[in-house]
Amino acid sequence: MPYLVASDLPTETAGRRFRQLLKAPGILQLPGAHNGMAALQAKSIGFQGLYLSGAAMTASMGLPDLGIITVDEVSFFIRQIVRAAQLPLLVDADTGYGEALNVMHAVRTFEEAGAGALHLEDQILPKKCGHLNDKKIADARDMAAKVAAAAKARRDLVIIARTDAAASEGLDGAVARAKLYMDAGADAIFPEALNTAEMFRAFAERMPGVPLLANMTEFGKTPFFSASEFEAMGYAMVIWPVSSLRVANKAQADLYAAIARDGGTHNMVDRMQTRAELYDTIGLHDYEALDSSIIQTIVPEAMPQ
């Protein structure tokens, strides 16, 4: 009961807990969680941290990932995910929603909402998914100023600087930017859209001692690598940003097609989370036990036929 019972809440800040995860042996695996239910399901499997993707957020709102959502909209997602799972959360902060003061506002807002880390990218608006073509890259010094502003605004929040420069400036340009961002106050680096194992290894070799984040998104420029393969290439963290949303969306599309085809959901029941599974995941009985006026729910055992 992490949400309502104060004694069950973490005593350390999310930022400190995220740093502890980074220091632990092995690569930190951060599956994307696009809402509170996804966060609970990931936690039940045993994941110790989560990732909130800007692409997953916007897609779940029916919008493209072009930097058009606001700090407050992202904060709503942060609060529900942290409230549900109480796990350290890495948040996609896009370009920081503006310049230095906007970045500082986002850092303070996200940290107060419960985020443990965020990453900022060196694109200019309108930004695009890192695996798409013709991204517009910011001046490296302007991006470094944003990183410095973020570092000044945070208390414990981990600041990860993302560079999208490999596609337009090559590995040398991406490494040079990464070093500049580290000097500005970043805690880690996220080299986006590297497309070969050789590139991943070469980037890591040129950034010794720096925690690196790998992005294992589907349908992008990066070939499939496992967490252990990324670890062997020198990476400290890996995210699967939109995977949960892709699977959920595909299943949802199949459901609507079945209703239109069959006139009901009867042919989809075996693919559904049951009522009992839903209540178990959200801890319904635990909540009910906190209020003696609530009669404990009896879950129906079967579908009436």
Image (cartoon, rainbow, N blue to C red):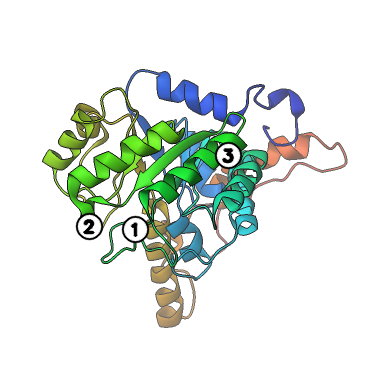
Tell me which label, 1 or 2, sits earlier in the chain: 1
**Quarter of the image holding residue 13?**
top right
Tell me which label, 2 or 3, sits earlier in the chain: 3
Say which of 228 and 117 sits in front.
117
Measuring 32% from the left and 22% from the top, which residue is drawn there? 26
**Quarter of the image holding residue 199?**
top left
**Quarter of the image holding residue 82?**
top right
Measuring 23% from the left and 30% from the top, which residue is drawn there? 228
Residue 142 percent across, percent down from the top left: 44, 50
* Amino acid type indicated by mark 2: Ser
* Amino acid type indicated by mark 1: Ile
Pointer 1 with pointer 2, Cβ within 8 A? yes
Tell me which label, 1 or 3, sits earlier in the chain: 3
Measuring 28% from the left and 52% from the top, which residue is drawn there? 165
Pointer 1 with pointer 3, Cβ within 8 A? no
Task: Identify the residue at the far right of this view.
Answer: 293
Measuring 65% from the left and 56% from the top, which residue is drawn there? 72
User: Label 2: which residue?
Assistant: 168
**In this image, 137 relative to 154: left or right?**
left
Say which of 183 and 289 sits in front.
183
